[in-house]
Image (cartoon, rainbow, N blue to C red):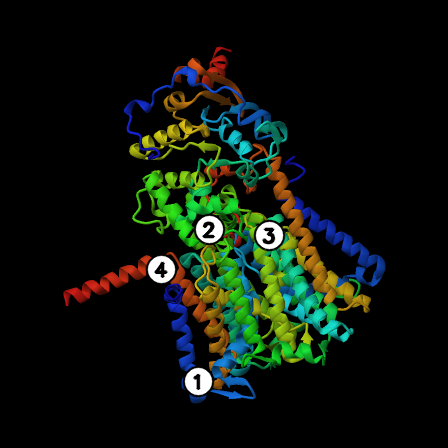
Amino acid sequence: MMLGKAPTAESHLSRRPATAAPSGAPLVRAEGLGRRRLVGAFDAELHAGAVLGAAGLLGSGRTETAMLLFGVETADQGQLVVDGKPVTLRSPRDAIRLGFGFCPEDRKLDGIVAGLSIRENIVLALQAKRGWWRRLSTAQQHELADRYIKLLDIRTPDAEKPIQLLSGGNQQKALLARWLATEPRLLILDEPTRGIDVGAHAEIVRLLEDLRDRGMALYVISSEIEEVAAYSDRVLVMRDRAPAGLLEGDSITPAAIVNAIAADHHTQGAA
Amino acid sequence: MSAFILIRLKAARPQLALLVLALLVNVFVAPGFLDLRLQDGRLFGGLIDILNRGAPVMLLAVGMAPVIATRGIDLSVGVIIAISGAVAAAGVNAGLAWPLAILAALATGLVCGLWNGLLVAVFRLQPIVATLILMVAGRGIAQLITEGRILTFTEPHLIAVAGATLAALPLPVVVALAAAGLTGLLVRATALGLFVEAVGTNPRSSRLAGVHTSLVLGAVYVWSGLMAALAGLIATADIKGADANNAGLWLELDAILAVVIGGTSLYGGRFSIGRSVLGALVLQAMRTAILRAGLPPELNLVLMALVVAAVLTQQSPAFRPLAQSLVRRFKNKEAQA
Amino acid sequence: MGRFVNTRTLPLLATVVVFVLIYAVCAAQYPAMLGLRVMGNLLTDNAFLGILAVGMTVVVVAGGIDLSVGAVMGLTTVALARLIEGAGLSPALAFALVLALGGLFGAGVGAAIHYLKAPAFIVTLTAMFLARGGALLISTDSIPIHNTAYDTLAAAAVALPGGGRLTLVAGIMLLTFLAGGILLHGTRFGARVFALGGNGHFAQLMGINTGRTTILAHAFCSLMAALAGIVFSLYTRSGYALTGTGVELDAIAAVVIGGTLLTGGVGGVAGSFIGVLIQGLILTWITFDGTLSSWWTKIAIGALLFVFIAVQRLILVASARYGRSGAGPAAPNTPNQAASTPPSRSSSGAAAPSAP
């Protein structure tokens, strides 16, 4: 099948039936995970084939939850349970070993390696996972890069172009390709559709839905509330660097999310 | 394979042109320069001489190139030459068997590299600061080992490091070329080269993509220390003594210049072992030409400065658009005429 | 926290403590070192280093580094000897000429750094080769200077109580520190230097002409190197091309030991003065001891350098971790902060392994 190319118009921005909501043992469970001066303790469950959305204002602690889940920062409270076993993530490498992937918010600073080619950017995470000794042969790298360029429809004449010459949307797709190449079980995406043209935007949303349907667990942080409401099975709302609520099933509506984000401000206004 | 070599040669055109230019000057000032003759199973001639004299800087450049590619710098290689040379000399003088003395010298280089690597990778000091510490203290440590004297020795095997012949070539040439080949293989046949270039270009992204950045950073300094120790053995064997004051003095600069001439950006990223070796040979050919022409050797410093200034100008982001607009204007004029 | 652990004051405080400790050890062991006589000699012997350190401080605070100061100093001594002995110029005219040339040389270096966008250390390294090579091309031998005015200047001194002498050379050094302090902390140029070193990108956004500031900072540094050359030639009454080989390292060490951050933006000349004195004290102590060999100086300075850099690093990490927001700029492993911190474009940042 062609990932992200499903042309069903209604799949975009339409809620799935509530019966598809996740059940059973989660792949990853955060229990009171937090780090002093970074983000307050939060709970989260990530299921295979389900999307956990994260909403909140800028600086509300959304990105910080992703950093703890991916080992960018090490949690100093609570615990993370993966496959039913508690784990400690000391670095992104620990998370990658467990089958996690992370597309960060700032593509330029934290995502692409500008100067290296699209091919090198795509194979980087998989190569890092294999270790320095087991190098992917040049042929394997080309095969991998060409496959994902075609699969995700990355608009480039060839894989050897420096990645910084691509448009924002195509850079984002290349970063997604970097993680898909590692065949992750959980993909964490921080603002995957920010600063991207409308066409690529829709493609990426469709791609996320496809990945979910194929059994991947997704954690999507986004400011696009309509979008979060549409594809999420649960929504974690963050406020002031701490969790402010968890919406589930039919209670996930854009209005409910906005209410949860702004609740604090209402009470402040009343006081 | 041959296509691969052709691509590499194409990328090295500026360095090859510089080298040919410097060799031509040599031919011009000393007509018999290109002659090679075989005597007692060893090749002699101007080209061999340049390879032989250039061996230490070639080794340093081989170690320095990956360091610079990680956006780093190793200022301590000159003193590592002095320290490792002192260790080898003191070793054989204290009755240590020569293989052990050589191993001790190499181990010294490793330890120095490890120290630098620790400061840069774990302590996260700026590389220029981290390696400055050893650069300042290192001469003192070398003098401590030699007790301030030039430590001469007569151990024939240690002297042979600089004097022996292997495959009709002086041993230092073989060692330097082998080290270059091994390093090239190590970075290109494994994923290390990709990791080094990724870490040098964007350390944050690399870490998030799962690259073990601190290990990569540490490793390049350890390797640089090892290469410097090899260079130290050759330099010490060459004068049959360890000179803590002068061994390797300013050679870190030669190594940096060789890598810069080799086209590696000081802002990290792409690097090439082969082109860095060519850079070292360019420097040596220049030096030899000045000596053969009977010019004051001091001129070499000025010439080196001019070459680096030219390379920096050519590499600078401001120069490219300027040069391109000049070329365009020139072409327009031609079209009008 | 900020009141007690301050990135600006703590390194300087540590320097003063170390100086007092070393001085106390020296004085306890050799009471003769306590006198103004030794102090006077200390100032005279390290006058050139002090002057170099003033210039180096300005460049390092601006976020750069200058490896060419030793070579410029050497070139100055040779040029002076040639101008006075060969061309028969009066010392005053020769001084003016070499100072002007020194300033111009530095301006050229600064311009190359700014316009070529090349790392400061490689440009100044090239400048070092140029200056050293030029000096050696003028003369490879030491040229003695025979000039009565010169002898008078070299011998000029104010008597200090206790048999000590404050020589003209030492006086120039003290005045240089005073001038450097005023320049760095009391003028708009100084404020621009701090802004440039703190964050070149922000400095640009604030409307500071970064090119002009870089050029002026390097011009000042080379001017100081030329002045150090004059002072050194007064001290030795000769000119020699290899004068000052490696003193750039001593100058940098003095600046770092003095609490100026090599990353730029924080520091001052007062600390550098104490850094110079610490180096001088160690050397004097080793001379007094007699049994210790001179190489212990280098090892001791290297060790001090390490300790001070480590302390600075720890302070930076601590202030980043326990700072106001808990998300300081120094943590290299926090990707979300990048959005609010544009990459530093300061010239020394080039050699850093990670974004500062």
Within-10-Å neighbours for mark 2: few <14, some 14–19, many 20+: some
Q: Secondary structure at mark 2?
A: loop
Question: Which amino acid, mark 3?
Answer: Val
Name the disc covering residue B34, or none. 1
Nearer to us of marks 1 and 2 is: 2
Return the chain for callout 4: B
In the rendering, which numbered label is found on residue B319?
4
Q: Residues within 10 Å of mark 3 (few under 14, many from 20)?
A: many
Q: Position of residue B181 (x, y in %)?
A: 51, 66
- Of tags 3 and 4, the one toward the viewer is 3
User: What whole-number distance in Å separates the C-alpha atoms at marks 1 and 2?
Assistant: 43 Å
Q: How many marks?
A: 4
Q: Residue at x 57, y 72 (%)?
A: B175
- Res A136 label: 2
Q: Nearer the viewer, mark 1 or mark 3?
A: 1
Q: Nearer the viewer, residue A213 or C246?
A: A213
